[in-house]
Amino acid sequence: MRKVKFLWVFVLLVLAVSAGPSTVGGQEPLPQGDVGAVVTPQPPGVDLQPGVWEFIADNYLSHAAEFPDPNESVKPLRLYLDGQEMLRAGKIDEAVALFRSAVASYPDCRHAHAGLGYALWQRYQQSQAKDDLRAAVQEFILADEIGMKYGRVHYTYLIAIGLGHLKDLAMLDSYFAKALKDGNEPYLTSLDYARGLSLLEDPSAEKWYKKAIALQPQGNVDALAYYAEWLLDQRREAEVLQVLRPDAHIEYLHFLRGVALERLGRTHQARAEYLQYVKYSAFDPAPSRYHIPGSQAQKGIIFDDQIGPLGLGCNGYELLANVIECEAGGESEGGRRAVGWTVRTRVFKGTLAGCVYVNNYSCGDFLSCKYECVITQANQFVYSCGRTPGSTSRHVRYDVYNGYAPDPTTGYCPSGSYQGDACSGSVHCSNGGTNGASNKGPMRFYGTTGTCPTGGQYSCLTSKGKVCGNGGSDHCFYNRP
């Protein structure tokens, strides 16, 4: 057990190294030297193939979600990264061919099978050919069978969803019996099993939702939300109210309580729940299947069949939820925020022209575009793992993007006031705009002219909705008084 714990502690340290400069206090020092020259030492008790530690030090294979198995060498891992970049560029057939070759050359490499699974899955999404879907699921199962030799599972979600759509209950039960016995993710494995069973309309889904709820990490509400949806779809509204607490801090849970209350005829109480979701729905619209025609209680709520993209200029906001889900889907709310803040810190620090580690200076004026630039830089973040972001990741994305919660790693939030020039040295804004960083950390400045302020003292601008996890005044946007 000590060896396993040590591995995960080390993986987190490698994640910090591969993310570039230190983010202590929500800040990054100006880069020194070439990040490619950083060599991660191999710790005792963690055995990887020769050269793998050095190879993964500067890419997302060092992150916990993609960490190599002890039997994987550098060459197939490099092929995996190359194939993933092909998929992100839309070169699906080329990626399928590359991964088929990788599987033939390295049949015992988990990443080779997983890469082929991703390529076939993406081709299925275009073709809707069941042969592609079944072949993709088979590759993910083969990949996880290799992973389970080392005590880890990785692809439970894709396998569950795929077998659910294929209506293959026997294979679903067989795979998850092994995954629950030999894997390291009892929470995610139980939740994904429940979701696969739900697609098959198997009543035993309820048992596994309840098991997942019992295993949920702190602040993680995905199992609660999916179970509540399942109950609503079963028309068991009274039980939703028993499962979801009225003091939940996740906005979507209030929406689900509202649906249950309104269906039960308790319209006034439903409206009170909906009001806690209205503002949030502009960023995360509600599922249209819960839209009650003619409802006055749901007034102001935006549903996902009513609007197009958010109009944030790019896909960075959506990609941020993907990163959080892919890299920390089985973690606590704080663990997910740590991932989100890693991205956020790069986004705001990278607005300085000439930044070595992250340069999104020319990515457009929209903040979402800067997020997209940072997230999609080659081999830096896992954002296309196939998992659909759940309620927790979407809530964390909302808080991180808008600056409504602190960095959980340090408890950091911008606070107090800042004296000095916000646009010089390591304290800067982007191209004369209002997004930037100071020694107070990543922030948005609000000057009297709407541009980057210079000189003078900057203090909290309370009208911009600043809050922290404790609801206090320790997270501020800055303006010139």
Image (cartoon, helix red, strand yellow):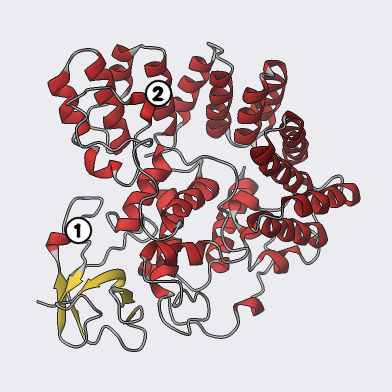
Q: Nearer the viewer, residue 347 or 223?
A: 347
Q: Nearer the viewer, residue 456 or 26?
A: 456
Residue under the image location 30 percent in, 81 percent down: 432
* Sequence-earlier tag: 1 or 2: 2
Quadrant in the picture for residue 222: top left
Between disc 1 and disc 2, the foreground one is: 2
Residue 378 in the image: state x and y as whole percent: 62, 65
Q: Residues within 10 Å of mark 2 (few under 14, many from 20)?
A: many
Residue under the image location 90 percent in, 51 percent down: 105
Please name the residue that numbered disc 2 is placed on: 229
- What's under tag 2, amino acid-wise? Glu
Label 1 – label 2 distance at C-alpha: 31 Å
- What's under tag 1, amino acid-wise? Lys
Q: Is residue 53 above or below residue 159?
A: below
Please name the residue that numbered disc 1 is placed on: 466
Using the image, tell me which numbered label, if any, was put on residue 324. Answer: none
